[in-house]
Amino acid sequence: MDKSDSINVLNKKYGNKGGRTTIRPPAKINKTLKKSLKILCSGVDTLYLSIDVFWKDLSFFHRLQDKKANAVAKDKDLCFPIHHEKLLIEYLFNIRPYGAQGYEWLLYNRDYSLRIGNWIKPKNRPSIRIQFHSRTLWLNGLKKSIVFILRLIKELGGKIHTIKISRLDLCVDTLFPEEIWNKKLIDKNVTRSRHAGMYFNNKNLTGVTFGKGHIHARFYDKPLEIEQKSKKYWFFDQVWKIDEVPEGYKLIRIEFQLQREIIKDLGLNKLGHLYRLLNNAWAYCTGDWLKFQNNPGKQSHQRKTYPWWKTIQTGFTITNSIKEPLVRCKRINPDKKTLFSQSFGTMSSLFALETETNPDRQYKELTIHDSINSFLDNISEFGKTNNSLKEDVFNKRAKYQKLEQKYAEATAKRKKLGFI
């Protein structure tokens, strides 16, 4: 039986449905399952604290001054040992031969960097600024790292008055499937920020950023950053517990940097809040401030969060707190001194301009009353009246009242959620 006879037999048996049989093998079906995102670790990568201190005497300052003088004479950083009495160890810093930003002494080692001011009592500027390096935060833990340096300050004769969190970097390190690590990420985000950017190396995507203000997020190839910049190879064996990145994945760090303004607005005012509410801060960052959803351009009810981003949202597990997002609310800063200083500076600038540009206004003695009279003379020139002042004051009172009401509602919600 030849080929045509075989076809006729099949047609008689099954009927001719209009199709044609084929002897070609079936198409190959790719049974490879899509890779899922995996969390390697989560934690605080950078922390800055601003501390106000009362020093009981100047003995520590004298030691710093002597060592800095030696560093200046030798034009290099010198070792500065500090004896830790409770641990019975000498803890080593290096001291630089210069200061910075109004701080007399700069100390650093692989765990911390300290800026110490040359004043014995607190003033407008913090007495000490402490930067916690990633090594101590990852290997020793957040609380242990904080307790150690605060005890060291106390042993050096400092009585800590206030502690403020100036910067907080939260992150998760992920095995990120290569199939979703691409330029389309930037189109799928939903964020409060208008700014977004991408970074490439030889046309390969290496990083994505969102925001550039008091809060911003960075997604970047961490092994590449280690290779090119930080040289923190200890992450592989001491934190990630891997020798190399598995095939089909990128090791991506997803990091949120929070500055002082947003930290205040979220209610992270004390160290106790920091210890308890890190999960909730992460929930705000990955739920309220930034998320990734399908159907770009559609209305919110038509968009759903990607499963891989849900893994990110639940992947930060530093504390045992519930993962309700922190409540963000700005409080009125009732700083009368700041407003007065701004007003005084503006008035003095106006008065200086008047005396320089108006030959009829030359004063032998400059007094506050002269400055006020000069200001009063300008009121009518620029069309200001009593009604203008009343309107401005009324509008500002309404604004302050609205902000206070919002803050009261936010405080009530924080209490209900157990944040305060």
Image (cartoon, grey):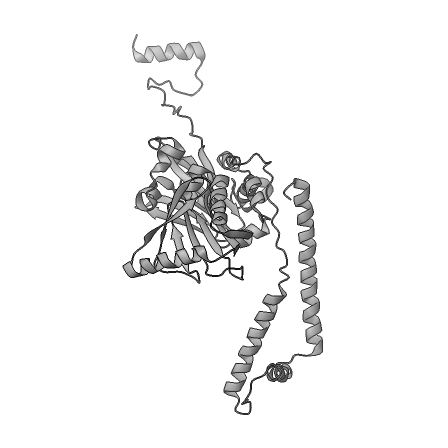
Of residues 226 and 299, the one nearer the viewer is 226
- Counting from the top left corner in percent of width and height, residue 87 is at 44, 39
Residue situated furthest left in the rendering:
74
Q: Quadrant of residue 180?
A: top left
Residue situated furthest top in the rendering:
1
- Counting from the top left corner in percent of width and height, residue 74 is at 28, 58
Residue situated furthest bottom in the rendering:
360
Horizontal side of 257 relative to 94 (left or right) equals: right
Of residues 188 and 146, the one nearer the viewer is 146
Of residues 223 and 28, the one nearer the viewer is 223
- Counting from the top left corner in percent of width and height, residue 307 is at 51, 34
Horizontal side of 32 relative to 387 (left or right) equals: left
Of residues 82 and 143, the one nearer the viewer is 82
Position of the N terminus, as image quadrant, is top left
- Counting from the top left corner in percent of width and height, residue 359 is at 52, 91
Q: On screen, 223 above or below 49?
A: above
Q: On screen, 354 above or below 134?
A: below
> Do we see residue 118 in this rendering?
yes
Residue at 52% across, 82% down: 353
Position of the C terminus, as image quadrant, is top right
Number of numbered discs visible in the structure rendering: 0
Residue at 68% across, 56% down: 404
> Do we see residue 215 in this rendering?
no
